[in-house]
Amino acid sequence: MLDVVLDDPRPWKAAMDTIYSFLPEGTLYFSGNGVHLRAMDPSQVVLVELFAPKDVFSKYELGAPSVPVALDFSEYTKILSRAGGDDRVRMSLEDVSLSVIIERVNGSFRREFYLPLMDISDRDADIPLPEASTTVTIRAKLLKDALRDSGLFATSAVFVARPDVFMIEAKSQQGVTRVVARPGDDVKISSELESISRYSLPYVQNIVKAADPDSFITISFRNDTPARIEYHVSGIKLTFFLAHMIL
């Protein structure tokens, strides 16, 4: 049994849209403390994690310690896209389907959707991840602007961090972009050594797209290693481990 309600579905919608950028399908595990997901994308480039604590939901009832819900995220995000700011979303299990009910908060209008559950096995997500030597916490608006600037000339960028500076540099035959951020109210840097690594710009842009402009995004990495990118959408925590590219 599963019966959960979102009075404000917008953060959940934004989180699931971001996850769908990488995972065409997956299993959401509803457990006693909240909803978990951990899976590798089909191209084996990014490991995706989600945790939504149960207090994100106004109602959260389970019939077992853990209830797996395997879904086609393409169809699921289509359904969620139909929910507006004046709606609440209720999700429950009915036989072999997930029932998604979207209704006005005042109860005047109601729409019901039934999405078949899938029989899928999660891709192996138990992979060793190196410890980071550098952590940068940056306001989301600044990072999004930097990524857009970097994308003018290239599809990948080099991230450079030292104790006094965080830089994103992208170059191609068309030109060079260098964005320089110093520690302050909008940027915090924890680094004892210089860290340099290259990452795909489209992947990073898709990873951070759900972040509120005024929120903060944490990037942890070291020389030529995957980056851990983490932020919250309201109370929902999104974490991504993005493979690096050869310098």
Image (cartoon, helix red, strand yellow):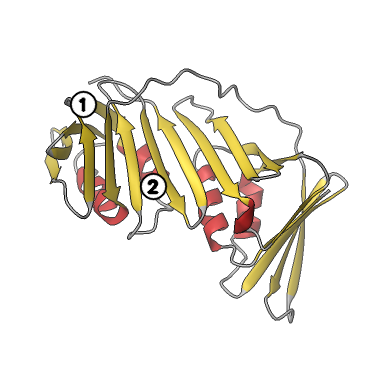
Query: How dense is the environment of label 2, judged by Cα within 10 Å: few (below 14), some, or many (20 and up)?
Result: many
Q: Nearer the viewer, mark 2 or mark 1?
A: 1
Residue 242 position (above or below residue 30): above
Q: Which residue is mark 1?
A: 195
- Hey, what amino acid is under mark 1? Ser
Is tag 2's residue or tag 1's residue first in the polypeptide sequence? 1
Identify the element where label 2 is drawn: helix
The span from disc 2 to disc 1 (Cα, nearest Å) is 21 Å
Left or right: 155 in relation to 17:
left
Q: Nearer the viewer, residue 119 or 167?
A: 167
Quadrant of res 116: top right
Q: Position of residue 124 (x, y in %)?
A: 59, 21
Quadrant of res 132: top left
Q: Residue at x 74, y 79 (%)?
A: 107
Q: Position of residue 169 (x, y in %)?
A: 16, 36
Are circles 2 and 1 on residues that touch, CB within 8 Å? no
Residue 204 position (above or below residue 57): above
State the count of labels.
Answer: 2
Q: Residue at x 75, y 73 (%)?
A: 110
Residue 201 position (above or below residue 115): above
Q: Which residue is mark 2?
A: 208
